[in-house]
Every structure is written in structure tokens, then in C-alpha cells.
Image (tube, rainbow, N blue to C red):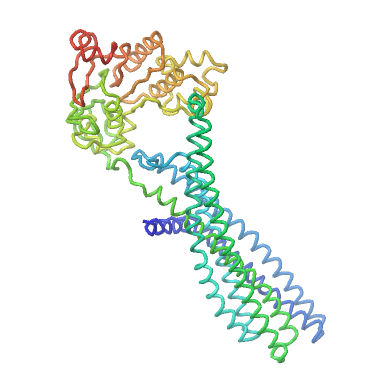
């Protein structure tokens, strides 16, 4: 499993480099020019020393000094422009990964958030995306460091073949050792990010439920739970830091030994008279230059290890299978036939459930005609939740099927289906922002929707009216106020089919009655299904379907069911 994740992580990194190939290429070229300039500096200084001391020549000295100044200008410009290109590539790559992750999390197929707390997804979309995107900055630096080493080796070969060969043979060995030493860091970095994401998820859950914890007096237990989680995250971070320190220390030690060996060989060549004073200066300068690229390569190995670990976590989210399958869209016509394109005709909004079997539902058959206003009473709350999830196509049923205007849900693309059918689930969350922002999140029919849902009364009770802020997840509002705003948001979307699950459980009876009338009037001529046990909402329905034991037990207008069905009276009036 881990190997599969690593391969997927490499695919993510390859995609990052491919997406930013122009900036990465620019960073490589500019960085390489900077490194070549750095390698030329000691050689030019050696030439100047020869012209000034060994063979004094003022004109030649001036010419070479000018060349040295020009090289300084170019290497400085190459460094600045190369760093800018690398930073741009890194930030754009991280941004691209964040957008891909958000698209996957918000994908109508679902699945990305299954088994992952919100805090864990936030950690992947921020820190992991940043680390994976940094490969677009790391690779140009590594490439330029390699070019710098090669340039240094070539220049050393011109001064001394033994020194040049020593560099050429020693560098690949150091690179291989760097990759070998980076493997423990990659594993520990992956564990570090997993623990950090888990700690973020626990923190987000505790903050979201702080009022409940206070009401239960469970603050100490919650604090102890987070302390243990945070400690585990800290331990993982320390282990990763320790692995990084060991890897960096060993690489620096190996680099130091390598440079000492170069200096020893160079010193013996000077003493033997094989190289002159200018060549000695150049060799010493190149020996001092070489640790820089080697340290960059050591740093690159550590950063690539972190990038691979984070890319594996990003790939894990991106490759998560959806809860429902993605299919090619087929558009229903008003007469029930299938159109060639979704743009041919708008659907009328008929719903049909045929032999629906899933998690307690046992062969439910129900037909809702276009424009009909239907109430659905489910005697078991778990079965009601299952029905709503199937209608929202968050899951596909085990057997049977659902149809929109004669076309099975499974033959409609999830995004297309949800542009026609809106399912407002019980306990829908609000967003930070104003009342108006929440109501118009998916539609602009603000005032009629707010009036029908009673959200206009909520606005009238707050300073600022519809522009009043509601706080994170609407926590500045009461439960009943949040329900009215969420219902107004669903109504404002003005979908062909609207399914609402228990929208008024925290609302008083008088307000609930007004809302029932408002929904009925606003949705006149549009298909509406209310999954609820509220008598006020059921009273305005054209008819009510009663589901008991996972099967359709009865259906009739509300008043008739109250008269003839004791099961219905128990479910609705008890």
C-alpha cells in the first residue's frame, strides 16, 4: 500500500514539474548561469594574479578585471532572476495543487472526506500542497548545483587532471549517499504530516463542538484527548527533525572529508610544481566553491524526501474513489424520452423510486408527478436519512433505481443531476459571512425565499438586517434561526426538484405554520418533497407517503391519513 502511495506521489510531482515547466526551465537556465559564473570567479582571479604578480601587464590586468566585473554582474542577475522564477513556480504549483484538492473535495461524486476529518483535509490542502509544490523550486536549484559542480570539475581538469577526476568520481558517490540517507527522513516526514493532520482534525472537531462539551462538562476529557493527540504529533515531528539532523550532519561530514581530500591532492600538486601560482589560486577558490553546490544537493535530497512524502498524501486524496460513479450525462425531455444534450429541453421534474433497497429501505416505490407537493413520513429516522442520501445521490442504492423524468439517476452526471435536484439535508451548515451571502450562495431569489422561510424575521431581529454577519457556521444564530436561513438558501436556488428533510424541528408552531404556507406558495408549479413528521408542513402537501419498515405503507392527503391510520397518527401527532 505504501509503495502504491509513493508511486502516486511521484506522479503528482511529475505533474507539478510538467505544469510549471517554463518557469522550472527558466530557473534551471538562470541558476546554471549563476553557478557557472561562480565557478569562473576563482579562475579569473587566478588569471588576474598571474597578470599582476607573476607576469605584470597593466593593460592585460585591466582587461581581465573588466571581464571579472562583467561576470559578477551576470551571475548576480542570474541568481536574482532564477530565484524569482523558482519562487513563482513553487507558489503557482502549490496553488494548482490546492485547487485540484478543493475540486476533488467538492466533487459531486463525494468520497474525498470519507474517513478524513476536516482538519486533516485542511492540512493536506495547505502544508502538504506547499511541500509538494516546492519541488518546482528545488529541482532548478539541484540542476544548477550539478552544473556548477560540472563546471568546477572541467575547470579543475584544465588545471590538473587528478583533481578534476577526483571531483567527477566523488560527486556521484555523494549524490547516491544523499538519496540513501534521505529515505528514513521521507518515511518519518510522512508520519509527521499524518500526525499533524490528525491533530488538526481533532482540534477542529473540538472547536466545532465546544458548546456541547461545555454543556456536558466534558472540557477536561476533551483537553486530555487533544493533549495526547498533540503529544503524538510532537513526537512524530521530533523524530522527523532528528532524521533530518542526522541526514544533514552525515552529508556535511562526508562533504568535509571530500573537500579535505581535494585540498590534500591539490597541495601535493603545488608542492611538486605541477601547477603555478595563478592555478593554485584558482584551485583553492574552486575548492572553496565546491562545498556550496554540494550543500545545495544535500539540502535538495532532504527537501525531495519531504516533497515525496507530502505528494503521496496529496495523491491519496486526489485518487480517492467517489461514493457514486461519474457517468456521461443524459438529459431528460419533458415527455420522458432522452435528449441528446442537456441543453435540448429543461426537465419537468418528475421523480420515481422503483423497488429502492438500501440500508433499511426494502423495496420503496414512490412516484412524484411534475409540480407536485408531496410529504414523506418515515417512521424510523435512520431510514429517513437513507432515503435522503439516495435522493441526493450521495450513495447509489443496493437495488432498485431512482429516475428523474424517466432517466435513471445513474445515467446522469452527478453535477448535472444536482443542478436540477436540490436536497436540503437536516442540519445543513451555514457559512461565515452575512445572512445575504448564505441565502444567495446558490441562487439569487433572496427576498421571496427569505420571506417564505421566515428568514426575513431573522434579518429584522439583527442589526444590519440581511447584511448582518452570522459568524462561523452561523454560531451567532439560534438553532431555529439557522434552520430558517438554511431553508431560505434552498428555496432561493429555485431548482426543478427540491427535497427538504426536517427543516423546522427547532422552530415554534406558529412560525412553522407560516413557513409551510410560504413554501407552498413559493414552490407552486415546482416539484417539492418534504421528508418530515411536522403536521404543519404535511397539512399543505397534495398528499403524504407513509414509509414504515422500509416499505411504502400508505399514501393519501394528510387529513385522510390522520383519520384512517393509527400508525400515521403515532408518527405525526404523538
Q: Which of 66 and 242 is in front in this view?
A: 242
Q: Residue 513: give x, y in percent of width and height.
A: 36, 10
Quadrant (top left/top right/bottom left/bottom right) for the N terminus: bottom left
Residue plotted at (42% across, 28% down)? 442
In the figure, 472 relative to 516: above or below? Answer: below
Q: Which of 353 and 415 is in front in this view?
A: 353
Q: Residue 197: give x, y in percent of width and height.
A: 48, 45
In the figure, 313 relative to 429: above or below? Answer: below
In the figure, 212 relative to 232: above or below? Answer: above
How many numbered circles does the render carry?
A: 0
**Horizontal side of residue 203 vs 546, given as left or right:** right
Q: Which of 437 and 574 is in front in this view?
A: 574
Q: Residue 451: give x, y in percent of width and height.
A: 43, 14
**Horizontal side of residue 305 vs 502, given as left or right:** right
Q: Residue 207: give x, y in percent of width and height.
A: 51, 32
In the figure, 174 relative to 7: above or below? Answer: below
**Residue 519 visible in image:** yes
Q: In which quarter of the image is residue 375?
A: top left
Q: Quadrant of residue 388?
A: top left
Residue plotted at (27% across, 17% down)? 373
Quadrant (top left/top right/bottom left/bottom right) for the C terminus: top left
**Residue 528 visible in image:** no
Amino acid at each position: 500500500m505504501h509503495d502504491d502511495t509513493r508511486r502516486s506521489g511521484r506522479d503528482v510531482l511529475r505533474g507539478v514539474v510538467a505544469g510549471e515547466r517554463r518557469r522550472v526551465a527558466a530557473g534551471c537556465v538562470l541558476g546554471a548561469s549563476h553557478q557557472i559564473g561562480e565557478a569562473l570567479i576563482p579562475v579569473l582571479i587566478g588569471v588576474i594574479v598571474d597578470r599582476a604578480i607573476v607576469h605584470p601587464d597593466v593593460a592585460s590586468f585591466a582587461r581581465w578585471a573588466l571581464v571579472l566585473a562583467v561576470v559578477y554582474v551576470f551571475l548576480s542577475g542570474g541568481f536574482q532572476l532564477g530565484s524569482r522564477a523558482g519562487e513563482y513556480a513553487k507558489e503557482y504549483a502549490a496553488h494548482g495543487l490546492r485547487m485540484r484538492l478543493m475540486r476533488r473535495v467538492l466533487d459531486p461524486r463525494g468520497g474525498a472526506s470519507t474517513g478524513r476529518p476536516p482538519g486533516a483535509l485542511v492540512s493536506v490542502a495547505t502544508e502538504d500542497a506547499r511541500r509538494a509544490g516546492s519541488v518546482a523550486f528545488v529541482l532548478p536549484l539541484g540542476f544548477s548545483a550539478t552544473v556548477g559542480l560540472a563546471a568546477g570539475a572541467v575547470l579543475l581538469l584544465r588545471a590538473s587532471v587528478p583533481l578534476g577526476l577526483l571531483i567527477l568520481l566523488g560527486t556521484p558517490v555523494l549524490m547516491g549517499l544523499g538519496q540513501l540517507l534521505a529515505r528514513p527522513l521521507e518515511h518519518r516526514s510522512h508520519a509527521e504530516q499524518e500526525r499533524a493532520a490528525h491533530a488538526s482534525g481533532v482540534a477542529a472537531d473540538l472547536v466545532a463542538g465546544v458548546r456541547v462539551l461545555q454543556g456536558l462538562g466534558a472540557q477536561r476529557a476533551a483537553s486530555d484527548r487533544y493533549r495526547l493527540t498533540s503529544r503524538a504529533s510532537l513526537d512524530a515531528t521530533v523524530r522527523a527533525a532528528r532524521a533530518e539532523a542526522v541526514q544533514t550532519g552525515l552529508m556535511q561530514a562526508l562533504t568535509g572529508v571530500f573537500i579535505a581530500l581535494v585540498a590534500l591532492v591539490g597541495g601535493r600538486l603545488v608542492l611538486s610544481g605541477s601547477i603555478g601560482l595563478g592555478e593554485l589560486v584558482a584551485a583553492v577558490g574552486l575548492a572553496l566553491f565546491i562545498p556550496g553546490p554540494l550543500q545545495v544537493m544535500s539540502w535538495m535530497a532532504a527537501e525531495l524526501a519531504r516533497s515525496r512524502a507530502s505528494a503521496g498524501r496529496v495523491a491519496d486524496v486526489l485518487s480517492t474513489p467517489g461514493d457514486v460513479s461519474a457517468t456521461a450525462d443524459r438529459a431528460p425531455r419533458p415527455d420522458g424520452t432522452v435528449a441528446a444534450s442537456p441543453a435540448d429541453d429543461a426537465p419537468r421534474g418528475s421523480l420515481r423510486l422503483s423497488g429502492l433497497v438500501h440500508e433499511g429501505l426494502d423495496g420503496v416505490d414512490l412516484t412524484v408527478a411534475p409540480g407536485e407537493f408531496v410529504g414523506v413520513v418515515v417512521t424510523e429516522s435512520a431510514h429517513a436519512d437513507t432515503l435522503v442520501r439516495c435522493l441526493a445521490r450521495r450513495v447509489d442504492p443496493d437495488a432498485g433505481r431512482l429516475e428523474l423524468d424517466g432517466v435513471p439517476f445513474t445515467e446522469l452526471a452527478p453535477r448535472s443531476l444536482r443542478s436540477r435536484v436540490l436536497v436540503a439535508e437536516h442540519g445543513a451548515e451555514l457559512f461565515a459571512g452575512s445572512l445575504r451571502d448564505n441565502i444567495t450562495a446558490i441562487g439569487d431569489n433572496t427576498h421571496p425565499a427569505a420571506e417564505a422561510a421566515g428568514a426575513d424575521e431573522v434579518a429584522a431581529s439583527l442589526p444590519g438586517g440581511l447584511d448582518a454577519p452570522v459568524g462561523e457556521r452561523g454560531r451567532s444564530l439560534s438553532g431555529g434561526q439557522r434552520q430558517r436561513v438554511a431553508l431560505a438558501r434552498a428555496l432561493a436556488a429555485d431548482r426543478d426538484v427540491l427535497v427538504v428533510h426536517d427543516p423546522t424541528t427547532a422552530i415554534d408552531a406558529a412560525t412553522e405554520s407560516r413557513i409551510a404556507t410560504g413554501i407552498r406558495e413559493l414552490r407552486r408549479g415546482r416539484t417539492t418533497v418534504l421528508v418530515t413528521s411536522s403536521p404543519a408542513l404535511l397539512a399543505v402537501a397534495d398528499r403524504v407517503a407513509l414509509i414504515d419498515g422500509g416499505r411504502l405503507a400508505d399514501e393519501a392527503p394528510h387529513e385522510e391519513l390522520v383519520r384512517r391510520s393509527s400508525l400515521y397518527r403515532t408518527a405525526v401527532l404523538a
